[in-house]
Image: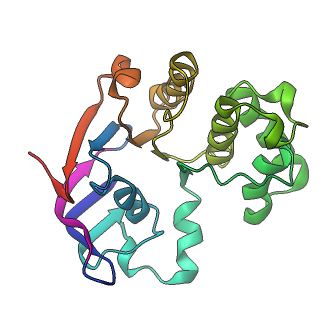
Amino acid sequence: MIRFDHATKRYPGGLTALSDVSFDVAPGEMVLVGGHSGAGKSTLLKLIAAIERPTGGAVLVNGQNVGALKRAAIPYLRRNLGVVFQDQKLLFDRNAFENVMLPLAIAGFPPREAAKRARAALDKVGLLEREKAMPVALSGGEQQRLSIARAVVNRPNLLLADEPTAHLDPDTARDVAEIFLDFHRVGVTVFIATYDDAYFAPAAPRKLTLDHGRLLA
């Protein structure tokens, strides 16, 4: 499902975000990646999603070398994965339903099928009754659940999340973590950068730890 083969990411100016990182993630596995602030967790996720490309080594997702993909092929790679960003990236001029519909519209789904999928995704995260609410009217936890709904509306086989429980109160964080655990239980591969390991303990996930861009044994 995911393979890092001596992957390195250097940014202009000499900053090395990741250095010689190697690991594999099997289909259906749940993996957490931890480490200090600036350890390289977000960069790791961006390489998987082809938001960034490695400057050394290789990153393979579903058998595809993301560093070698042509720009036109990247949207097709992303149709099989969902990403929950730390800053959520919601569209605040569109309501909850319209936010979730957007990926389906971009992918060319027929409107009726897209609406059915969008409402199913909202129902999955407990926001169906708030489909007409604007993001500004949602709590922090509801905004996070909305970003999850948008990430999974394409029914991806790989779900990535960057600190999905950060800045949430403990009860809300547990609810958000439970959504990811539910997807893991039905066979979705889940890869999460997080400080809050305990929220995902019921799944006994595998843990990777980064330290200044290097993967610790």
| Quadrant in which residue 120 is drawn | top right
Q: Is residue 116 visible?
A: yes
Measured as percent of width and height from the top left, residue 112 is found at 90, 48
The residue nearer to you, when weighing 47 against 144, is: 144
Numbered label tally: 0
Specify whether 217 is left or right of 49: left
Left or right: residue 209 versus residue 163 is: left
User: Of 95 and 195, which appears nearest the observer?
Assistant: 195
Q: At 30% across and 57% down in the image, what residue appears?
A: 40
Residue 45 in which image quadrant = bottom left
- Does residue 108 appear in the picture of this structure? no
Residue 85 placed where, x, y %?
Answer: 54, 51
Please indicate whether residue 76 sits to the left or right of residue 121 in the image.
left
Residue 157, position as x, y percentages in the image: 50, 46
Residue at coordinates 33% horizontally, 78% vertically from top-left?
Answer: 11
Q: Which residues are magenta?
A: 15-26
Residue at left offset 53%, top offset 73%: 74
Q: Residue at x 34, y 58 (%)?
A: 44
**Front residue of this view, candidates 206 and 29:** 206
Please identify the dominant SS of the magenta region: strand
Instruction: Tell me if residue 100 comes above or below residue 183 in the rendering.
Output: below
> Which image quarter holds the C terminus?
top left
- Residue 86 is a magenta residue: no
**Residue 161 position within the rendered picture, expressed as x and y whole percent measured from the top left:** 48, 45
Q: Residue furthest left?
A: 217
Q: How is the image coloured?
A: rainbow
